[in-house]
């Protein structure tokens, strides 16, 4: 799934050296094979509570949820969420239907729209709500149609977001000539820094399922080197900024590139992202987690690169996480001669046109030579010393060393992470849970889930608990509530009550009639034993 339809000078080279020093040191991927060990209580110890849903009443559909995207839970139990067409809603504790607290005009084509929401760390005091939305206006620049993705802040007054309170925190321009990959998730860390995920804004459909690195003139939207691997662009990144009360932001210390580094942007915390659709921060240590929706190639190719992998990544500090030069555990892509490939495709198309016109084979254009012979050995990118030579790259050429994925899997069964299964791929990363014995909440997740990362899948419709050790490496993985149906998990958040809150997007790609907002609660081993006896 692609959601929702993501060199210059000696001074620049010096900047790349600074960038490499500030990047985290490459690490090896988590060792071991994780088959799905049993460390969770039985499924009957948990329950799914529906908070809001589309429903049929007296034969008529009440479509109360229209493409819900991301949610945030306040300390008092109120649930806030956004819908892609620009509606912001609030669900009160004990309520059965969310109320509209704001409607904002958005551009909702090309996978854009209102995609993210989060609450200020001091929301109880200031009522500040942050939303990530695409402005409706489309304009032109030298490359074609463009639009703006904005993070705005509003103040909640009563049951409405006050339109007069709106301030702009962040703007970024993206191309609107072609789809895809927008990202859109928002999250705060314990220090009050705001993280913003932005996809690579690149068309993936003309690169045979491999990385789209087409540098030819006129192919700007097909070149992810201009975005995800461009240190001077905010596209294809996860940004880390400090919002200001009056609007705008400052740059916190510790990002990938120090302010003033030539050929870079100081907002960048993580670069090399394809579509980081959901992000989360471990409140105990500030580690960043996100799911990376990967490309479509079903199998590796010796002359092109690896099969498509989805990834769950862990960033203990800033870094370059590979795309579009590497995938999975730093498996490299080949440097492609797109001119030769196009000549071959054009020649093939000319022969096919003559054939369809009914011409005898002798009058067809000559059969083209393969654009790559079977013995051709292409150049592959080097994860230890990645170079971005695209003419569309406006930043440094020498990039920080690439970081391998924390969890990665293809469409086929994974030998390393077999618990993830097989099929379509849409990896997302949810919260890290830390059991709090002092938290007075009857349905908080149990001690067995202490220090567990939750990952989830829109396409495969599962939630997996990933048990972490003291060094935050994986020790166990297990399906969470495997017998419970989750219809396209869209966002998974941890509430202040220690329960999980989930958006079920619904059966299809949009405009569903079975969307839900649910809470996943722990009801205890005694309840599980009782239900077994009954």
Image (cartoon, rainbow, N blue to C red):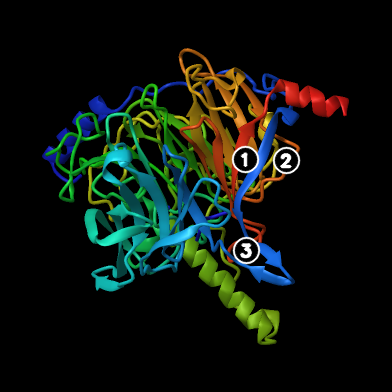
Question: Is disc 3 placed on a helix, strand or loop?
Answer: loop
Q: Nearer the viewer, mark 1 or mark 3?
A: 3
Q: Nearer the viewer, mark 1 or mark 2?
A: 2
Question: Is disc 2 placed on a helix, strand or loop?
Answer: loop
Sooner in the amino-acid sequence: mark 1 or mark 2: 1
Q: What residue is shown at x 17% (from left), y 34% (from top)?
A: 258
Residue that protrudes farthest toward the right in the picture: 534
Q: Quadrant of residue 513?
A: bottom right
Mark 3 touches mark 2? (CB < 8 Å): no
Within-10-Å neighbours for mark 2: few <14, some 14–19, many 20+ = some
Does residue 480 appear left or right of residue 381 in this picture? right
Sooner in the amino-acid sequence: mark 3 or mark 2: 2
Q: Position of residue 302 (x, y in %)?
A: 57, 41
Residue where numbered disc 3 is placed: 512
Q: Viewer-proximal residue, 63 or 351?
A: 63
Q: CA distance from mark 1 to mark 2?
A: 24 Å
Q: CA distance from mark 1 to mark 3?
A: 28 Å
Q: Position of residue 77 (x, y in %)?
A: 47, 41
- The answer to whether residue 76 of the structure is visible from this angle is yes
Q: Quadrant of residue 480?
A: top right
Residue where numbered disc 1 is placed: 410
Question: Is disc 1 placed on a helix, strand or loop?
Answer: loop
Q: CA distance from mark 3 to mark 2?
A: 20 Å
Quadrant location of the C terminus in the rendered image: top right
Mark 1 touches mark 3? (CB < 8 Å): no
Within-10-Å neighbours for mark 3: few <14, some 14–19, many 20+ = some
Residue where numbered disc 2 is placed: 484
Residue that protrudes farthest toward the top in the picture: 470
Q: Viewer-proximal residue, 344 or 47?
A: 47
Within-10-Å neighbours for mark 1: few <14, some 14–19, many 20+ = many
Quadrant location of the N terminus in the rendered image: bottom right
Vertical order, 199 against 45 (above or below): below
């Amino acid at each position: 799934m692609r959601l929702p339809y993501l060199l210059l000078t000696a001074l620049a080279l010096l900047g790349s050296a600074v960038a490499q020093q500030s990047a985290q040191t490459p690490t090896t991927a988590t060792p071991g094979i994780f088959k799905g060990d049993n460390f969770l209580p039985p499924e009957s110890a948990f329950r799914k509570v529906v908070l809001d849903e589309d429903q049929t009443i007296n034969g008529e559909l009440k479509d109360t949820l229209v493409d819900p995207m991301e949610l945030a839970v306040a300390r008092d139990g109120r649930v806030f969420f956004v819908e892609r067409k620009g509606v912001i809603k609030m669900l009160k504790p004990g309520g059965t239907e969310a109320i509209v607290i704001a409607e904002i005009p958005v551009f909702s084509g090309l996978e854009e729209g209102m995609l993210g929401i989060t609450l200020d760390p001091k929301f109880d005091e200031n009522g500040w709500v942050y939303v990530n939305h695409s402005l409706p206006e489309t304009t032109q620049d030298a490359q074609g149609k463009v639009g703006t993705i904005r993070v705005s802040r509003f103040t909640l007054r009563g049951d409405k977001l006050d339109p007069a309170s709106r301030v702009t925190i962040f703007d970024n321009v993206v191309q609107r000539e072609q789809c895809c990959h927008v990202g859109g998730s928002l999250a705060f860390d314990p220090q009050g820094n705001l993280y913003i995920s932005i996809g690579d804004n690149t068309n993936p459909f003309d690169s045979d399922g491999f990385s789209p690195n087409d540098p030819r003139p006129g192919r700007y939207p097909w070149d992810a080197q201009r975005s995800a691997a461009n240190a001077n662009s905010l596209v294809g990144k996860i940004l880390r900024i400090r919002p200001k009360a009056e609007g705008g932001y400052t740059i916190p210390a510790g990002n990938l590139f120090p302010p003033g580094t030539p050929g870079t942007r100081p907002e960048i915390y993580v670069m090399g992202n394809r579509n980081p659709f959901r992000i989360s921060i471990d409140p105990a240590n500030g580690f960043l987690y996100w799911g990376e929706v990967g490309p479509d190639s079903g199998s590796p190719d010796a002359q092109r690169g690896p099969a498509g992998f989805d990834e769950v990544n862990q960033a203990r500090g800033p870094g370059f996480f590979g795309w579009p030069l590497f995938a999975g555990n730093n498996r490299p892509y080949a440097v492609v001669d797109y001119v030769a490939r196009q000549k071959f495709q054009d020649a093939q198309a000319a022969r096919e046109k003559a054939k369809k016109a009914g011409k005898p084979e002798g009058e067809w254009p000559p059969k083209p030579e393969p654009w790559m012979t079977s013995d051709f050995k292409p150049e592959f990118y080097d994860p230890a010393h990645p170079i971005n030579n695209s003419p569309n790259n406006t930043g440094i050429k020498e990039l920080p060393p690439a970081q391998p994925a924390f969890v990665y899997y293809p469409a086929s069964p994974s030998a390393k992470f077999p618990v993830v299964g097989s099929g379509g791929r849409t990896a997302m990363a949810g919260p890290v849970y830390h059991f709090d014995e002092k938290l007075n909440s009857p349905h908080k997740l149990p001690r067995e889930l202490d220090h567990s990362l939750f990952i989830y899948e829109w396409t495969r419709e599962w939630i997996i608990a990933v048990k972490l050790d003291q060094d935050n490496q994986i020790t166990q993985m297990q399906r969470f509530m495997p017998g419970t149906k989750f219809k396209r998990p869209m966002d998974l958040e941890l509430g202040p009550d220690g329960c999980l809150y989930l958006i079920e997007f619904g059966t299809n790609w949009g405009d569903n009639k079975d969307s839900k907002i649910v809470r996943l609660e722990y009801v205890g081993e005694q309840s599980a034993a009782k239900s077994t006896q009954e």
